[in-house]
Amino acid sequence: MNEANPVYSDVFDTQKKKLGLLGGGQLGRMMIQEAISYNIDVHVLDGDPNAPCKSIATSFREGSITDYATVLDFGQDKDVLTVEIENVNIEALEALEQQGKKVFPQPRVLRIIKDKGLQKQFYLDHHLPTAPFILVNNMDELRENRDFLPAANKIRTGGYDGKGVVLLRSETDIPNGFDAPGILEKFVPFSKELSVIVVRNERNETVAYPVVECEFNPQLNLVEFLFAPAAISPETEARAKEIAIDVINQLDMIGILAVEFFLLESGELLINEIAPRPHNSGHHTIECNYTSQFEQHFRSVLDLPLGAPGIVLPGVMINLLGEAGYHGDAKYLGMTEAMQQEGVYVHLYGKKQTKPFRKMGHITVALPDIDRAKKIARQLLQTVKVIS
Amino acid sequence: MNEANPVYSDVFDTQKKKLGLLGGGQLGRMMIQEAISYNIDVHVLDGDPNAPCKSIATSFREGSITDYATVLDFGQDKDVLTVEIENVNIEALEALEQQGKKVFPQPRVLRIIKDKGLQKQFYLDHHLPTAPFILVNNMDELRENRDFLPAANKIRTGGYDGKGVVLLRSETDIPNGFDAPGILEKFVPFSKELSVIVVRNERNETVAYPVVECEFNPQLNLVEFLFAPAAISPETEARAKEIAIDVINQLDMIGILAVEFFLLESGELLINEIAPRPHNSGHHTIECNYTSQFEQHFRSVLDLPLGAPGIVLPGVMINLLGEAGYHGDAKYLGMTEAMQQEGVYVHLYGKKQTKPFRKMGHITVALPDIDRAKKIARQLLQTVKVIS
């Protein structure tokens, strides 16, 4: 923590504040799972009647988190509102903020992050390192900027999980681009993808987690798993944390923020993108760190002190995605074998139905020897399957 | 694990089996909290409409767990039944077992453990080490056995948390004894109190946890905290585990069992008592071991493989008891300070009302240096208070 702790209320009585959560997916579910240990009630709004949070939320309301009237009404009897997904109705959150509710992360921050154009402009304005970019409005403007290629063309709003992004290597790729408001981001060859989770509360206390690294499978050209601590120099570790803390401070944001980086061969770090909520790259913190990202999430928005982020065990995280070709009631292959192994931690998200590449759960392998953990994680990628 | 693993079902589909839990207290609550990670539904029966499990159970039925008809009816649509407290209607569980339901721990085992006379006789019959005892039916029989003193007089059924036990040092203490069916257990001077948690599933796989030790405060003559691993010789550690495994095997019990021991100056171990459920002496396993006692509980009764019991971090556990003199809505003092410290894990039990000595929560201090953990635990005993 970067500042002396001011005095907190001597009386811990979290039930005085009514916490509302927009979004009832796995990120909310894992937050609630940990909030139980502090007697913290969590009231959830989500449009899916089978949302992962439903059976464990203190109360669950079925309704659209992107609908102005629904969000405004949901917030009326809450004291604090937070999100587990960016795609929410920001105008309603602004209205709630004006009513005097605490809304963390602040709607102002969500507005910047939701729009990749504003997000990139924010980095520029605050001298935060990121790849050069150009704002474009349509395919004609992609053509006009052909000299800027190779570059990634990203739509400004609505993209997620790799959707809404296409790499334009040269002019001939331009027809694959988006005929919509977007950005052209200069392609920068990088050696690693890194991520840092940072947290900040109302007292401007901040905490940064140890850096996480993506492991790519070069044959398949996809992320196999994430691991922490990253295999990087102490200087890069310190610099990545420093930038991430700088981002959350410059945003003047309360809550939890994931900052994803490209590490270049030169050692330079560029911010790729940010997410103002618990993040896939922080799932291992449940077992691997003294305080998990999910606990930090509710600590940060409820005016509680932040927790220690130090490492208990190194760890490797794999996502359990719905297997291609399977739709329907989820079944899990290879699980009983996996759960017999020391250091293998299973997290299923309570989703009854699987579909191709749906995030159904994750497994963290946490062991003192990270090479052994990686080996086990690679085996589990072969043996654990979500089918129907 | 003491046997080669037989083949488990390749398809992990826990929702096929409907699990019913008798008792909705903190032991059930912590079990449900971990069952969430495996998509395991838990249906709870408890007489208290504000039971700690209520808001997180898949379903909650308000009803007496000691009432024959209520328990029998609750079990009708369940496949597996388990308990988080011994004081349940055993006859109803026997009837459910006869209907073909799986009931773990078995009613036969609950019957032995619930009655301290049968429990002690069981040890004798199976050559398990325990202090000498005499069965008594009333105060006259206490007098007849005055030559057996000093001895503890314990009522055969219904005692818990130190209630139903009185030490009779000499003949003059006899009027403090119970004029009821009980046992007289020879007082044996001991140097330490130890505990071992063991688990056994339907495949006769067994797991024993590292030994836990009680730390007494000699001034106050009460348990200050529990810590693990215990400060004992490797021989005593091995022998305690061996006896505990022997007890669960001789009982032919499926489920989780806490075995409490007296360690004599001679090095001899005597069984004090046993509990067929998760136990206060295993709370630290949530953070300190690869698999917690709560996860082992549901693994053992649901025909799942047992988890690895190895140590992640040494730990010290203190109970948060309602402060003497306070009744009413619970408030927690010293908590925000506690939760800032690395390695301090808070667990509150969701009880709205405090009363003197009520178990309201616990804190585990888990750190690589156990002496530092003990020091912090001693401080927390002074600073964290549950009042109203």
Image: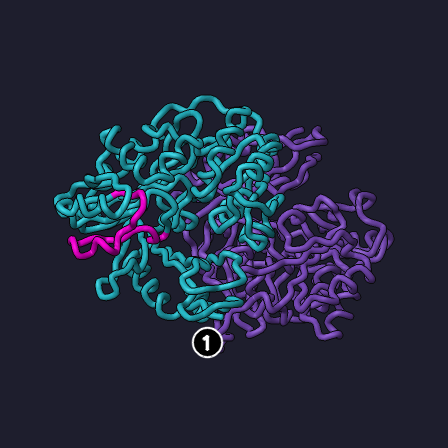
Chain colours: A purple, B cyan
Please state the horizontal and vertical placement of residue A270, each as a whole percent of the image. Answer: 60, 58
- Quadrant in the picture for residue B321: bottom left
The reply to whether the magenta stretch includes residue B165 is yes
Q: Which residues are magenta?
A: B161-183
Give the labeled residue for mark 1.
A4
In this rendering, position of residue B175 left or right of residue B340: left
Residue placed farthest to the right in the image? Answer: A140
Task: State the SS at label 1.
Answer: loop
At 59% across and 39% down in the image, what residue appears? B41
Give the image location of residue A5, x and y in percent: 47, 75
- The residue sitting at 36% across, 25% down in the picture is B3
Which residue is at the front of the view, A167 or A109?
A109
Give the image location of residue A240, x and y in percent: 53, 60
Q: Nearer the viewer, residue A189 or B309?
A: B309
Residue A235 in which image quadrant: bottom left
Q: Is residue A331 magenta?
A: no
Apparent side of residue B24 relative to residue A139 in the rendered image (left or right): left
Can residue A330 be seen at all in this image of the molecule? Answer: yes
